[in-house]
C-alpha cells in the first residue's frame, strides 16, 4: 500500500517539506483555485505537479477532487459543455501522468460536522457530528420545513432546551462548523445563502439524483477507460440524507448499484472507512471484501457511533471499524492484483482526518487535517501494514 497525504495547495498551513518528514510519498490534492465547471489547463496541472515533485521527490498521486458541478447533480439545463469540460480536464491530468480521480456526488455539502473541536479524552480535539446540534441548526436556525419530522421526540426536546441557552457566538460557531463541509477548501455560506442553495434542490429525491448520477457515469467513465484513468467515488459523509438532501452512495447496496451502472474497471470507489463506518448497518471490512476489485483509493480513519445517530472521529486504530481486518483485506487485494499481472497493483491510501494534538492546537489547519494528529494516524497504519506484510513465523520458531 502506498502512503499519501492530503495537501490543500499553496495556502495549506502544512508545507510540502513538512509532509516529506511524515514519510508519505504521494500527494493528494486539487486545483482549488479553478472555479467549478471550468477546464483545468494542462500547463497549470504541470506546474503544480512540478512544484510537488521539487520537494523531496513527492508525487501528485491522486486528484481529490475534480468537482462535479452542482448543475450536473441537479440535472439542470444543457449540460453538454460541463461534461466536455470535465472530460478535457481528465485528458489534461492524464497527459501529466495523474490517473486517479476521487470525486463525490453529494448535493451541496461534501461532509458535515457540528463540532470541529470536540474534546478528546487525554487531550486534543476531534471532529464531531451531534444529532441534537444538527436538529438545532435545521429547525431553529435554518428554519427548514419538515426538518422536525426527521428527529425523535427526545432529540427535539433536547434541541429546544439547548437552543434557548445558546448565545450568538454559539450559533455562529455551529454555522461555521457545518459550513466547513462545503466543497472546495475555503468557500462558506451564510444562512441566507444556504437557504437559496437548498431551494435549487427542491423536489430532488433519491430516484432523480440517481438518474443524474447515472448520466454522469455514462458521460465520464468511457473517457476514463480510454485514458487509462481510475475514477473513485467517495461515499456520503455522513451516510444519510441531510438538510433534506438525498444521499445515494451510503450503503453496500448503493455501491453495488453504481458499479453495475457502468461496469468498467475505471468506475471504482474510494474506500472511506470513516464515512461508511458512520452508518449503523455498514460492515466496513465486509464491504471492502465484496468490492475490493474496484477500490481505487482508500481513506483510512475511524469513528465511534452513538445510539442517537451522533458520531465522533476516533483514533485510527480505535473506533467501531476493525482497522486491522480492513487493512488485511486491502493487502490481500494488492496481492491478487500482483498475481494477475497488474502493472499498478498498489492501493494508494491516506490517513484521513486526525485529532488535533500538541502543536496542532491553534495552528489553523483545515478542519480534520492537522499535522501531528494525521502523522500519528499514519504511523499507526504503517505499523499495521508492516506487521501484516511480514511472512508468518512457524510455531515455536525463535527470533
Image (cartoon, helix red, strand yellow):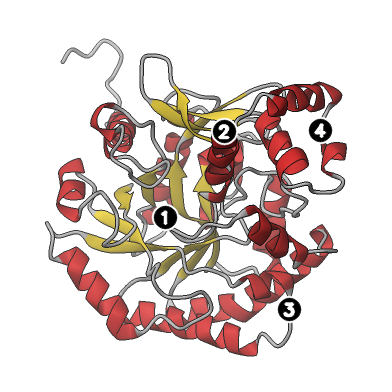
Q: Residue 257 location in percent, x, y?
A: 72, 58
Q: Is residue 301 left or right of residue 111?
A: left
Q: How many residues crowd mark 3 within 10 Å: few (<14), some (14–19), many (20+)?
A: few
Q: CA distance from mark 2 to mark 3?
A: 36 Å
Horizontal relation, residue 360 to residue 158: left or right: left
Does dot 2 land on a helix, a strand or a loop? helix
| Mark identifier at residue 151 | 4
Q: Which of the two discs, 1 and 3, sits closer to the camera?
A: 3
Sooner in the amino-acid sequence: mark 2 or mark 3: 3
Residue ID for mark 2: 170
Other residues around mark 1 within 10 Å, as few (<14) / some (14–19) / many (≥20) = some
Q: How far apart in space, not on screen, are marks 4 and 3 (Cα)? A: 31 Å
- Residue 210 lies, in percent from the top left, at 75, 64
Mark 2 and mark 1 in contact (Cβ < 8 Å)?
A: no
Identify the residue under disc 1: 337
Whole-angstrom CA distance, mark 4 to mark 1, is: 45 Å
Return the residue nearer the eye: 392 or 196.
196
Q: Secondary structure at mark 1?
A: helix
Amino acid at each position: 500500500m502506498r502512503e499519501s497525504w492530503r495537501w490543500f495547495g499553496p495556502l495549506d498551513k502544512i508545507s510540502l517539506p513538512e509532509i516529506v518528514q511524515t514519510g508519505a510519498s504521494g500527494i493528494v490534492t486539487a486545483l482549488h483555485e479553478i472555479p467549478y465547471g471550468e477546464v483545468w489547463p494542462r500547463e497549470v496541472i504541470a506546474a503544480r505537479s512540478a512544484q510537488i515533485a521539487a520537494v523531496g521527490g513527492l508525487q501528485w498521486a491522486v486528484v481529490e477532487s475534480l468537482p462535479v458541478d452542482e448543475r450536473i447533480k441537479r440535472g439542470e439545463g444543457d449540460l453538454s459543455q460541463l461534461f466536455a469540460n470535465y472530460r478535457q480536464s481528465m485528458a489534461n491530468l492524464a497527459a501529466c501522468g495523474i490517473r486517479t480521480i476521487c470525486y463525490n456526488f453529494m448535493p451541496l455539502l461534501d461532509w458535515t460536522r457540528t463540532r470541529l473541536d470536540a474534546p478528546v479524552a487525554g487531550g486534543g480535539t476531534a471532529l464531531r457530528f451531534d444529532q441534537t446540534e444538527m436538529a438545532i441548526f435545521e429547525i431553529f436556525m435554518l428554519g427548514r420545513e419538515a426538518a422536525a419530522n426527521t428527529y425523535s421526540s427526545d432529540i427535539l426536546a433536547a434541541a429546544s432546551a439547548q437552543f434557548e441557552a445558546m448565545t450568538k457566538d454559539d450559533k455562529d460557531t455551529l454555522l461555521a462548523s457545518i459550513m466547513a463541509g462545503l466543497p472546495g477548501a475555503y468557500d462558506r455560506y451564510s444562512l441566507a445563502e444556504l437557504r437559496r442553495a437548498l431551494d435549487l434542490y427542491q423536489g430532488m429525491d433519491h430516484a432523480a439524483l440517481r438518474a443524474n448520477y447515472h448520466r454522469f457515469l455514462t458521460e465520464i467513465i468511457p473517457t476514463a477507460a480510454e485514458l487509462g484513468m481510475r475514477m473513485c467515488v467517495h461515499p456520503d459523509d455522513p451516510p444519510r440524507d441531510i438538510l433534506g438532501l438525498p444521499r445515494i452512495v451510503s450503503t453496500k447496496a448503493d455501491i453495488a448499484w453504481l458499479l453495475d451502472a457502468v461496469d468498467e474497471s475505471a468506475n471504482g470507489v474510494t474506500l472511506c472507512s470513516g464515512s461508511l463506518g458512520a452508518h449503523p448497518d455498514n460492515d466496513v471490512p465486509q464491504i471492502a471484501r465484496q468490492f475490493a476489485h474496484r477500490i481505487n483509493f482508500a481513506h483510512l480513519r475511524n469513528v465511534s457511533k452513538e445510539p442517537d445517530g451522533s458520531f465522533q472521529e476516533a483514533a485510527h486504530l480505535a473506533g467501531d471499524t476493525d482497522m486491522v481486518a480492513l487493512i488485511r483485506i486491502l493487502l490481500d487485494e494488492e496481492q491478487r492484483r500482483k498475481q494477475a499481472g497488474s502493472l499498478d497493483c498498489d492501493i494508494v491510501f491516506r490517513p484521513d482526518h486526525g485529532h488535533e494534538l500538541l502543536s496542532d492546537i491553534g495552528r489553523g489547519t483545515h478542519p480534520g487535517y492537522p499535522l501531528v494528529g494525521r502523522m500519528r494516524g499514519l504511523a499507526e497504519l504503517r505499523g499495521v501494514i508492516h506487521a501484516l506484510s511480514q511472512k508468518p513465523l512457524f510455531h515455536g520458531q525463535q527470533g
